[in-house]
Image: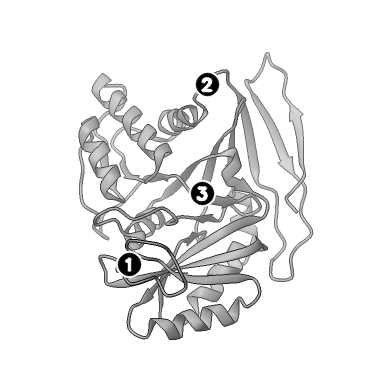
Amino acid sequence: MSNMAMAMALPSSTSPFLFSCTTQKQAHNFTSSRKPLHRFVTRSTLSDDLFLAAKHTVDSYVKNGMVVGLGSGHASTLAIQYLGQKLRAGTIKDVTAIPTCVSSASEAAKAGIPLEQYDDSLKIDLAFDEADIMEEETLAAIIGRRKLQGDDSIIKEKTILEAADQLIFIIKEKQFKGGVEGSVPVLIKSVNWLETAEEIDDLFLGDAEVWRRPAIGYAGPLGGDFPLVTKEGHNILDVIFTSPIESLVEVAKILDQIDGVVEHGVIFRKPCTAIIASENDLQIVDNTFLMESSNF
């Protein structure tokens, strides 16, 4: 059950925004007391809703002199292209970008955005990305469901996102869920991978199926004849939940404790903002108060 929103419209003469807050949801057994998320809604008549969200991200959050992490997916591509336009026009200056994947590096190069490779000593001011899906209650997100291209790395993408001082997810309304469904990608050591897969399967018995991701061909529990091996030498398990996930945060905690698990596609461990595109609205949601009040 997702939070019920209570919207209060401000006078149109004073603000173009609607402000709404959410009532506190009855906590799951594994959750702590939570305060409402911040929500703002803007009205728009633009037909390309995702472009509006990407444009808002660049206009509102990218400042002169920033180091910006560039995410993957169509929304990130739109934001990268628009950022390049602003740099060429001179309305934003001295921005350096850190790509999280091959496609974002390519788009940034075409847009004329200066690039640097990630270094853990480098301060990243802001990162934006498109989540595969996001949990409405917490803004916990899943990345890594998409097919990896070339040297793409879920580990690298997640590392850059978590290293940023400010994290923005650009998503469509259908990706913003009260009960998240589908798969969570889990990177595991390829040695003794089956033992790790069986342990995960036992932990989520009855709630999820565990399939090893193939490099080519059809997916299956064993990954077929050609299981995917990442650039770091790991396999990927897709933990496919057969019913809505009560808490992505709890799932992440469980996965973090399993021997053989290297990383997973759940991101939550920092405050973030979601820019949510719908047919007529643009919602801006942040979890600052939630992070301040929780014990996650």
Which quarter of the figure has residue 148?
A: bottom left
Counting residues from the N terminus, which is met first, the one under dot 3 or under dot 1? 1
Location of mark 3 (residue): 272
* Nearer the observer, 200 or 56: 200
Location of mark 1 (residue): 228
* Nearer the observer, 65 or 72: 72
Q: Amino acid at mark 2?
A: Ser
Which residue lies most toward the top here?
13
Mark 3 vs mark 2: give the one in front: 2
Circle number at residue 241: none
Calculate the distance from the C-alpha at mark 1 to the C-alpha at mark 2. Answer: 38 Å
Mark 1 vs mark 2: give the one in front: 1
Location of mark 2 (residue): 47
Above or below, 132 relative to 217: above
Above or below, 112 relative to 145: above
Q: Position of residue 184 (x, y in %)?
A: 51, 63
Q: Position of residue 123 (x, y in %)?
A: 30, 52
Q: From the viewer's perspective, tell me whether residue 149 is left or right of residue 238.
A: left
